[in-house]
Image: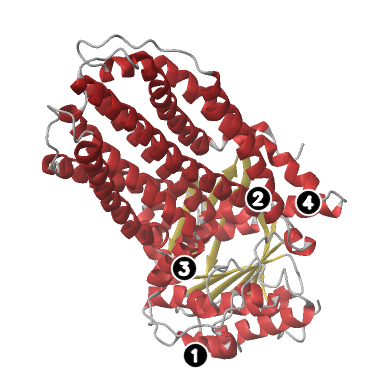
Amino acid sequence: MIISLKDSIKLVGVTVVCFCAVFVCTFMLSFYIDVQQLNGLLTDQNMRLLYQAQKATAQVCAIVTGGVLAVIAVVMLFFYIKIYIDGHAKQFGIIKALGYSNCKIALTFWIFGFSVFIGCALGFGVGYAFAPLVYNGLAIEGAPEIAVNFHIELLLGLVVAPAFVFTLIACGYAYWALRCPLMQLMRGKTAKIKDKSYKANKERSFLKEMCFKTLASKKSVAFFVAFACFCFGSMMQMGLSMENLASKTMGYMILIIGLVLAAVTLFMSVTTLINGNLKNISIMKACGYSLKQCAFSVLGGYVPFAVLGFMIGTAYQFGLLQIMVNIVFKEVAEVPEYTFNIPAFFITFALFIVSYFSVMAFYVLRIKTISVKEVMLEN
Amino acid sequence: MLKAENVVKSYNGSEVLKGVSLEVQNGEFVVILGASGSGKSTLLSVLSGLERADSGNVEYNGESLSQMNDKQLTEFRKREVGFIFQQYYLLSHMTVESNVRMGADLAGNKNFREIISSVGLGDKLKSKPSQLSGGEQQRVCIARALAKNPNILFLDEPTGALDEKTGREVLDYISRLQSERKFTMIMVTHNSNIADMAQTVIKMNSGNIVETYKNTERKNAYAIGW
């Protein structure tokens, strides 16, 4: 087998994203279905309105969370497959030279669908385990209790179908990515070198140029860094604001999901970035560039994307809560008014700065341990 | 003067350098000659401050590299050292100009484009390493090292990946530069013919220096065997 199960384990980021998506979707969609039990049982007009609003909330949360995270999981899967093929281009070249077709090699990427299956299955299981807690949190005083029921359609839609679709996507993308000349693969290259005419640009110092080129050559990392900070900014603030709007439990749940998503995405993308630049960093170290300069040249370009991600996240959570409170719950009485939570913003922003730069400091230490000789001996 | 005293270095319990001592005068051209696995590249790494010796001392102009912390070693490499590697180790996603600028910026050298022209790549400023031949890539590596204005130039098998014609051109260029600029040059090679170009030859075998001699007559790159 060309790709082992061990390789799919490296897709822990995709597994975590799938877990979070399916976890939220499971209890939200399950609530959406189970709440129909109350049809005809509620006589109070206000109660009926409240349940309608909660049904809408469950639907919106499942669509937004599930949709956004599914897109992220697909992008992550592409990102990892591309990195995998780039890193193993020579081996794939040799295998092709031996007579294996692109299709046969691409089919071995089915194993990457396994990490999606694991994430979805775990998310589904844990989602159901948490469902009673969520149902309690959403229950209205005086209304009949809603029982948690198992829905086979959710199992099919949230576990079986995503695993199947992601497996197809993995194989299809691998097939597409492997379609480059055999000799090019044997030389360890996958992408064609674009013979762009050089555009005269501003005279930049080497460090700035390196920073710019690293960013340009790893644009997907910028997306993931922004996404990680988006998760951190939006879900932390949403979690802190939830106490007044819903319940503490919901607040903690959102907060934890946000932190897990942010941490996994950031670590995965920055680790990939550093690993992909080991040789460049070691050359810079050999020449006499300091740790700080090496770190700046590789990581510095991503800071604006981190801040941008955080800001978009702030706007997103504000917009989403506004919609929930002012549109979905508009006709329901006793729903507190929602305004921008300034203390939550400042707390989250301070934590964001500290956390982001702590992670970067961790990677500076990682750069410190890169042995120039080891990296060079590997080549 | 670069001086090593009783330098020992091991990897995974296997002793690669077994108490090596040597002296290199400023401005000298030294070749360290030895077969694969003799420890010559490891010695180069230790002498250049890329790695630390397990024991023993390496001294440059009275400063002990063994006593330096990581920051001081980085500063030493920045200030004094240039490297030319067999595998070039260029930044593949950057142009020739940026690769050379990498060395030049460390020394505050604004004339790096002249150096690129002097190695015959003036028309390839905007090319990427993958668009160059092996000889051209090695010349970029040379330009990058020279742009730092190093006082010591370390070369690890600089012609190992080149054909004879290109290899001779590269050696000729480097040795002429060394004669003009009078920097110290320490070259590691397994090719005994190249040793004829050096002032001093240090022969290594199994982690030890087995012979050191001075050439009475130095040959140029086109007069040596290949």
Q: Which mark is residue A213?
A: 3
The residue lying toward the viewer, choosing from A249 and B120, is A249
Q: Position of residue A91 (x, y in %)?
A: 74, 50
Both marks 1 and 2 on one chain: no
Query: Mark 3 or mark 1: which is in front?
Result: 3
Q: Amino acid at mark 2?
A: Tyr
Q: Amino acid at mark 3?
A: Lys
Residue B176 in view in this figure: yes
Q: Quote the CA–CA distance across marks 1 and 4.
A: 47 Å
Residue extending farthest to the right is A99
- Classify the position of the C terminus of chain A by image quarter: bottom right
Chain to which the residue tagged by mark 1 belongs: B
Residue depicted at x 81% and y 79%:
B225
The residue lying toward the viewer, choosing from B150 and B216, is B150
Identify whether A44 is placed above or below B166: above
Q: Position of residue B57 (x, y in %)?
A: 46, 53
In screen coordinates, is A8 left or right of A347? right
Q: Amino acid at mark 1?
A: Glu
**Quarter holding residue A245:** top left
**Label 1: few (<14), some or many (≥20) within 10 Å?**
some
Q: Position of residue A40 (x, y in %)?
A: 33, 15
Q: Quote the CA–CA distance across marks 3 and 1.
A: 24 Å
Q: Quote the CA–CA distance across marks 4 and 2.
A: 11 Å
> For mark 1, what is the residue?
B114
Q: Which mark is residue A173?
A: 2
